[in-house]
Amino acid sequence: MVESGEKENLMELVRDRLVECGWKDEMRIACREHVKKKGRKDVTVDELIRVITPKGRASVPDSVKEELLNRIQNFIVSAAP
């Protein structure tokens, strides 16, 4: 996948889909709300990642997951000898 460039293509696909569905904006808002609640000086990047990551992973739309899975499966089938 790496050698063919497909990994990079898939990463770009996921980024695009997450922007299109508003996921990126939702995560930005969640981060800002957390910082606002805790206070700007009392939040570290590590804490923000620890708090927001589970929410982010849980909120990825099923359609994005399905599209990614289909693309991976198609790549594997087409790469098989």
Image: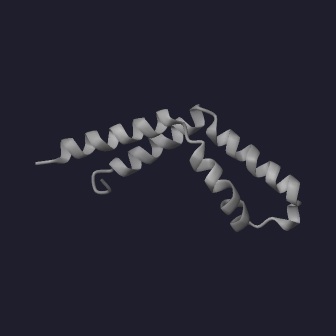
Residue nearest the viewer, comparing 26 with 57: 57
Residue 61 percent coordinates (x, y): 54, 36
Q: Position of residue 63 (x, y in %)?
A: 48, 33
Quadrant in which residue 52 is drawn:
bottom right
Quadrant in the rendering for residue 10: top left
* Left or right of 1 in this view: 8: right
Give left or right: position of 10 versus 29: left
Is residue 69 placed above or below 2 in the rendered structure? above
Which residue lies most toward the left here? 81
State the image coordinates of residue 71 (x, y, percent, origin top left): 34, 39
Q: Which of 3 and 39 is in front in this view?
A: 39
Q: Which residue is pictured at 74% across the width and 47% down the height?
A: 30
Residue 69 placement: quadrant: top left
Q: Nearer the viewer, residue 63 or 11?
A: 63
Q: In this view, does 63 lie to the left or right of 50?
A: left
Q: How many labels does the image show?
A: 0
Residue occupying the point 42% across, 36% down: 66
State the image coordinates of residue 64 (x, y, percent, origin top left). Answer: 48, 37
Is 78 or 33 nearer to us in this picture?
33
Q: In this view, does 22 lie to the left or right of 6?
A: right
Image colouring? one colour
Residue at (72% x, 65% y) in the render: 47
Residue located 41% across and 35% down the image: 67
